[in-house]
Image (cartoon, coloured by chain):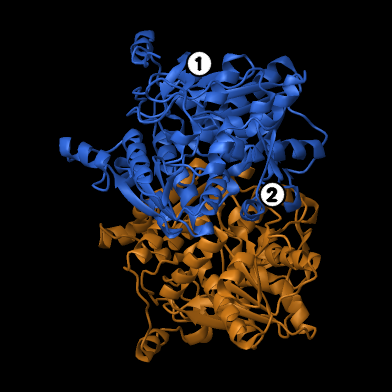
Chain colours: A orange, B blue
Amino acid sequence: MTDTKILLDESEIPTHWYNVVADMPNPPAPYLGPDGQLLTPDAMQAIFPPAIIEQEMSSQRWIEIPNEVREILRLWRPAPLYRAHRLEQALGTPAKIYFKYEGVSPAGSHKVNSAVAQAWYNREAGIKRLTTETGAGQWGSSLSLAGSMFGLQVRIYMVKVSHGQKPFRRSMMQTWGGEVIPSPSMHTEAGRRVLAADPDNQGSLGTAISEAVEEAASRSDTNYALGSVLNHVLLHQTVIGLEAKKQLEKVGDYPDVIFAPCGGGSNVGGMMFPFLADKAAGRDIRLVAVEPDSCPTLTRGHYAYDFGDVAGLTPMMKMYTLGHDFMPPGIHAGGLRYHGDSALVSQLYHEGILEAVAVPQLGTFESGVLFSKTMGIIPAPESNHAVHAAIQEALRCKESGEAKTILFTLSGHGHFDMASYDKYLAGELQNYSYPDEAIRAALATLPKV
Amino acid sequence: MTDTKILLDESEIPTHWYNVVADMPNPPAPYLGPDGQLLTPDAMQAIFPPAIIEQEMSSQRWIEIPNEVREILRLWRPAPLYRAHRLEQALGTPAKIYFKYEGVSPAGSHKVNSAVAQAWYNREAGIKRLTTETGAGQWGSSLSLAGSMFGLQVRIYMVKVSHGQKPFRRSMMQTWGGEVIPSPSMHTEAGRRVLAADPDNQGSLGTAISEAVEEAASRSDTNYALGSVLNHVLLHQTVIGLEAKKQLEKVGDYPDVIFAPCGGGSNVGGMMFPFLADKAAGRDIRLVAVEPDSCPTLTRGHYAYDFGDVAGLTPMMKMYTLGHDFMPPGIHAGGLRYHGDSALVSQLYHEGILEAVAVPQLGTFESGVLFSKTMGIIPAPESNHAVHAAIQEALRCKESGEAKTILFTLSGHGHFDMASYDKYLAGELQNYSYPDEAIRAALATLPKV
C-alpha cells in the first residue's frame, strides 16, 4: 500500500506562481469602471500596491514568489497530499482518491496563501495598515495572521451577525493582533449611512466591503486586500496545484478528474490552473468546479458584466453572476455564497475548459461526515462540496468498474464550523432549490453595459 | 538556514513503544486496592482488556505497535518537528528552539495516540463499546475518533458544565459517531445518586469517571478507557519522543533541556521517557515537567498513596498529589487541573531524574500569544505551559549567551479554546497562588495507607 501522505520538502515549495492568462485561448475580458469605460491601472492605486496591480494585469506565465513570502509559507507548506485509502475502502470503489489538505495552515484554510503575498507586497510599498472585510472569518483570520508576520496593522470589518455568532473566529483574529470592527460601524461614511437608516442593522458582506474600501481609499498609509475573485488572488493560490502535481508525480500518478469547491474561485484557480496547461496541450483531464445548489452561479447564472459587490462600488467584471444583489439563503458554507465568480474561472468555464456542478447542502454534510469517520479530518462546509463531488465520482466508478484517479482540494478544516455540523446532525438543515422565476428575477437586475 | 519543519516518512513511525520501566533505577511502586492490599491484574479485568493490563504491568523495554494501529497513526504521523526560527529571532536568543507539534492529529492533540491503541486492543478482545469521561473535551474527542476507526461505539460522559460551555467539542465527538451524555446522568447509579441530592448539579470529572467506570464494570460488552495517568497511556505516547529523537538526529542536534506540559503526565512521559535512557547512561540532559501555579502537584504536593479520582473508586497509586478532593480554580488549561500525577512520572521526579516547574496563568497566555504571532499556530492553553517555560529558558540563554538546544511539546492547538484567549485579551484572567495553609489543608485529606 502506498503511503497515506505524500510529502514534499520545503525546498520543493514552488519558486514561481503560475499565471493561467498565458495559456488561455483568448485574453481575459477587461474590467470596466462604474461608467462602463475600460478600467485603468491608475484607478486601482488608491487601494492596491503597484506590484499587485501589475499581477492583476499580467500575462507573463511564471511570476517569481519573493523569498520572504516563501519563508512564511514554510511554516505550513508544502501542504500534504493524501491518498484516501480508508475512504476508498468504505466506498468499495476501484477509483483512487487523492486530496490536497490546505487545513494545515495556522488559519485553517488555503486563504492565507494569498494573504501572506498581499501583506508582503503592501509592506514593500510602504503601507502600514490593511483593511478588509470578513463574513465566515476564514479570510479575516488569514489576513490577520499575515499582517502579524510582516508587522502590518490589520483592521477587519466583520459582518455584525457573524461577529456575534462566530466569536471564536473573532478571538483568533485578535490573538494575531488584528482589530475586528463589527460592520456596519461608525468608522466610515458607508457604515454611518446604514446605521442612520437602521440602527439595528446586522450587516452584510456588501456593507463590510464598502467600509473597508472607503477607509483604504481615504488613507495614504492604508490599502485594501481581497481574499478571492481577483486574478492576483488566484495566482497566489496556484502553489496548491503546483505542489499537488509534483506530489502525484512522486507516486507516478496523474488525475483523470479534479474537484474544488467554488465560491469566488480561489480554490478552483489555485488547484486547477496548473493542470490547465496540460489540458490545453491535449491531455485528457476534467476540471470540475463544485458550487452549492443554493448559489448556482456557474450552473444557472449569466455570463455578463456585473459589479463585484452588492453596493456597486467595485469595477465591473465579466463573469457568471446571479446579479449583484442576489441574496442566497443562510447556508452553512458561508464562503460559497458569492453572487458572482472570478472572471478568469468564468471565462474558462464559458469556453468549455472548466466544468461545473451544483450539489445539495445535505449531500455535502453527509459526505463530510463519512469523510470524517474514515479519514479523521473534519472538513469545512465549503470543502465538503468537493468531498461530495469526489465521492459521487468514486461511486460512479464503482458502477462502471473504472479505476479513475480522482483529486480534490480539501480547502480547510471545520473546527470553527461545528455549529453547522451540530445543526446537520440534529436534522435541522435543508436543501434549497430555486424555481426558474427566482433566478430570472435575480438576473433581471444585471447592469446594462 | 535549516528547514522550519523536520519531517519523517511514514515508514519511520516507530514500530515499538518504549517502556521506561525497563530503565528505571527502581521498580514502580505497586498499585493498591481500596483495602490497601496489592492490586492484582484480575481486579482490572472488569474494565480493561488483557493486553492493556499486561502493558500496565510490563517491564519489557520495547513493546511492538500493532500494524493496524500504525495504519491509523499514518493519518497524521509522524508529527512534524519544528525549528522555531521566527520565535528565536523575536526573542533575540542564541538558543535553538525546537517543538514537536501534536496538533496535527484530527482530534487536535496528542491524546489520540493512546486512544487508537486502546480502541484497537479492546476490539481485539471482542469488546463492542467503550465508555470514558471528558472535561475539556480533548480526550473524549480522541476516543470518539478512535472508536470510529475501529467500529466501536463510544459513550462519553461529559461534565455537564463543559457540555454547555463547549458545544463545539461535543459536536466534534458526535460527528465521529460518539454518544455524548451530560454528567451527572440518569444512566448510572452514581449519576442518579448525585442528581437525587442535587438536581441542578453541574458535574465534575470525578462524577463523570464514576459513571463511565460503573457502566463499563456492569456490561460485558463494554470497557473503560482513560486518557492519561496510567502506565499504558504514557507508553502509547512515547511515539512523540521517539520520533522527535530521530528528527533531531536528522539535523545533527540533541536537546540540552526538554519541556512538556504536565497534568496527568501523558505529555511528560510521551516526550521525555525515550530521552531518559540516555540520561541514565550519563547524557547531560534536563527533563522538566511544567505545571500550573494553580495546581502545583509536583512542586508543592506530597509523594504518597492516593486515589486517582475524587470519589475514591479507583486503585490507589503512589504519586505526587494535592489530595484527591483538591479542587483547583477554573483555570483555562482544563487538562492540567488533575490533583495527582502519573505514578511513573511521580517516582522519576521523586528520584531526581525529572524536574518540575510551576508557571503562572498570565505568563502562559502571554507566551502563547507571542508564539502565535511568530509561528502562526495558536497553542492550546495546556501547551502554552511548555511554550512559556521554553521562552523563559531561551531568555536565560540570552542573558548568559549560551546557545542551548531547547525542545518542547506543543501538545495541541487552541481552536476549541478561543474563549480563554478572549478572556485573556480582555484582561479578565488572573494568576493564582496558594497560601501554604491551603496546601496543608488539602494534603491533610490524603488516605492513610
The residue type indicated by label 2 comes to Glu
Of residues B3 and B11, the one drawn nearer to the viewer in this rendering: B11
Whole-percent x, y for residue B238 in the image = 64, 37
Kindly identify which chain the residue marked by label 2 belongs to.
Answer: A
Q: Residue B250 occupies which quadrant of the picture?
A: top right
The 10 Å Cα crowd at callout 1, few under 14, some 14 to 19, many 20 or more, is: some
Furthest toward the right, the residue is B252
Kindly identify which chain the residue marked by label 1 belongs to.
Answer: B
The 10 Å Cα crowd at callout 2, few under 14, some 14 to 19, many 20 or more, is: some
User: On the image, numbered disc 1 is attached to which residue?
Assistant: B299
Q: Residue at x 60, y 38 (%)?
A: B237
Residues at marks 2 and 1 on the same chain: no
Q: Give the position of the N terminus of chain B as an image quadrant.
A: top right
Q: Secondary structure at mark 2?
A: helix
Marks 1 and 2: in contact by CB < 8 Å?
no
Whole-percent x, y for residue A100 in the image = 65, 64
Which numbered dot is residue A402?
A: none
Q: Residue at x 55, y 80 (%)?
A: A319
User: On the image, numbered disc 2 is attached to which residue?
Assistant: A124
**Horizontal arrangement in the rendering, residue B71 relative to residue B7 (left or right):** left
Q: Residue at x 42, y 21 (%)?
A: B306
Q: Is residue A337 visible?
A: no
Whole-percent x, y for residue A409 in the image = 61, 67
Above or below: residue B271 compared with residue A332: above
Above or below: residue B246 compared with residue A380: above
The residue type indicated by label 1 comes to Thr
